[in-house]
Image: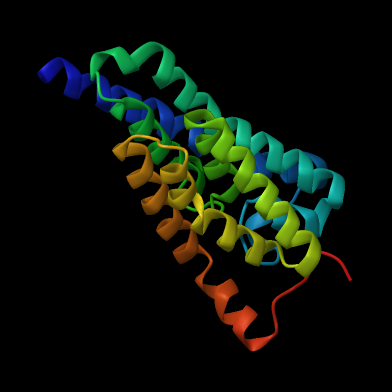
Amino acid sequence: MITIILKLILVFVLAYIIGSIPTGYIIVKVLKGIDIRTVGSGSTGATNVKRVLGTKWFFIVMLLDAIKGAIPVLIAVHYFNFFDYIGLSPVVAAIAVILGHSKSVFLKFTGGKSVATGVGTILALCWPVGLCIAAIWGAITYTTKYVSLGSIIAIALAPVLMNAFAQNYYYICFAALGAVFVIIRHRENITRLLNGTENKVRK
């Protein structure tokens, strides 16, 4: 039992450090020499990067953040999962990488809103669910022009989709907790959506 706990702690720490790598911050700093946290929403995520570097880098950062989210989970699935027998290691990795992205140890515990990173973790846990969420996000964002609305709705459906694809209890619980976390991170966006003042991704 102690061995399992130690392994889970190791998984958490490694995943948190990987999640803490501030992709958007690094790219903007290298290309523009500015701190992305001083721009727009102050987030290090893809949507805020778009305000500085344009649409191309929006998609690049989003892809990199998704990959960042998937890597620790895949490592846990293939190299640590046999230690707990019940699929808990990948969930611990998923939680840690999301926390790392939103509360980066390298940026004094600031970061992004964890949407792309969260989708990356779900793709690694159950790729059909991840693809469904990505498709829902794309459809809503394209039709409404609101990235935040697409993100909120897509992530909110994650636990429903996990259950629909008959995933285990831990995966469903993670999806539910992740959805709550991401929605809380978008509380200011929700207020602006209700007030009709939220920025659109395109005019």
**How many numbered badges does the structure rendering display?**
0
Q: Relative to residue 80, is residue 122 depicted above or below?
A: below
Q: Relative to residue 150, is residue 58 depicted above or below?
A: above
Q: Relative to residue 140, is residue 12 depicted above or below?
A: above
Q: Quadrant of residue 13?
A: top left
Residue depicted at x 34% and y 24%: 11
Residue depicted at x 45% and y 65%: 184
Q: Quick one: which residue is furthest to the right in this view? A: 203
How far from the left and from the top, in percent, is residue 130?
58, 39
Task: Tell whether 115 sits left or right of 161.
Answer: right
Q: Which of 28 and 74 is in front in this view?
A: 74
How far from the left and from the top, in percent, is residue 197?
70, 83
Q: Quadrant of the C terminus?
A: bottom right
How far from the left and from the top, in percent, is residue 202?
86, 66
Q: Relative to residue 90, is residue 45 depicted above or below?
A: below
Q: Nearer the viewer, residue 166 or 154?
A: 166
Query: Looking at the image, can residue 52 be seen?
Result: yes
Query: Looking at the image, can residue 21 be seen?
Result: no
How far from the left and from the top, in percent, is residue 107?
51, 47
Q: Nearer the viewer, residue 113 or 40?
A: 113
Task: Tell whether 182 sits left or right of 61.
Answer: left
Q: Quick one: which residue is furthest to the left in this view? A: 1
Q: Quadrant of the N terminus?
A: top left
